[in-house]
């Protein structure tokens, strides 16, 4: 079974690179999540629990999945599907907390609120956050579908190599 960069289908290479970049930027988000907080399935966490959750969900798990894709582990596609479905559900469960997020943004943007007007600011922020959460959930579900479609890349590799070894032993 050939592992590494070369045998990967192009679409998996693209998402593999995106996952690497995302894991790299997760390092920087860990520093800000202590005070800003993190929402996990609609429950806001602050302080050290938020840092631990972000460290595990946005750094450790993606790195394990990146290694699994590179090494071409047989059932990594299931772990990827579960991970990205969870991330999509987490995004959708954050929708009820939009008002809390707007309040956090408003604290640091008092000049902008004065220029735009309070009502326009809240409407604009509400639509922007709602759009980003729905788009994020859709993107994560699309990644899940792509890995489900491309699961044969992970599953057939070992079967092909095993049948080749059996044929070589017989001859």
Image (spheres, helix red, strand yellow):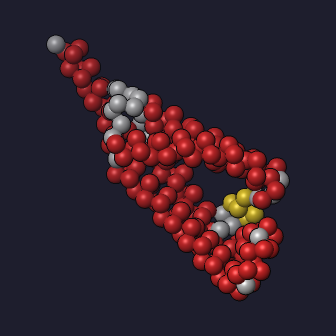
Which residue lies at the image location 55% right of the left edge and 43% below the top edge?
Answer: 21
Which residue lies at the image location 60% right of the left edge and 64% below the top edge?
Answer: 91
Residue 86 on image: x %, y %: 57, 57
**Residue 160, relative to residue 57: is it above or below?**
above
**Front-most of 21 and 1?**
21
Q: Give the side of residue 112 with respect to residue 71, left or right.
A: right
Which residue lies at the image location 33% right of the left edge and 41% below the top edge?
Answer: 9
Residue 4 on image: x %, y %: 41, 29
Q: Residue furthest front?
A: 115
Q: Give the side of residue 87 with respect to residue 29, left or right.
A: left
Q: Give the side of residue 68 with respect to residue 94, left or right.
A: left
**Front-most of 48 and 107?**
107
Residue 100 visible in the current orientation: no
Q: Locate the N terminus and report the quarter of the image it occupies.
A: top left
Which residue lies at the image location 47% right of the left edge and 51% below the top edge?
Answer: 81
Q: Give the side of residue 146 with respect to residue 30, left or right.
A: left
Residue 144 on image: x %, y %: 44, 54
């Amino acid at each position: 079974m050939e592992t590494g960069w070369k045998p990967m289908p192009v679409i998996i290479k693209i998402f593999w690179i995106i996952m690497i970049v995302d894991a790299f930027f997760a390092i920087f988000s860990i520093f800000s999540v202590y005070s800003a907080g993190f929402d996990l399935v609609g429950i806001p966490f602050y302080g050290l629990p938020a840092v631990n959750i972000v460290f595990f969900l946005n750094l450790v798990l993606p790195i394990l999945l990146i290694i699994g894709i590179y090494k071409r582990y047989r059932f990594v596609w299931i772990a990827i599907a579960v991970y990205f479905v969870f991330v999509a559900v987490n995004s959708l469960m954050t929708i009820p907390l939009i008002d809390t997020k707007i309040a956090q943004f408003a604290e640091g943007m008092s000049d902008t609120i004065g220029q735009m007007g309070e009502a326009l600011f809240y409407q604009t922020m509400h639509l922007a956050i709602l759009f980003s959460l729905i788009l994020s959930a859709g993107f994560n579900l699309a990644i899940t579908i792509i890995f489900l479609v491309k699961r044969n890349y992970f599953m057939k590799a070992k079967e092909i190599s095993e049948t080749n070894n059996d044929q070589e032993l017989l001859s």
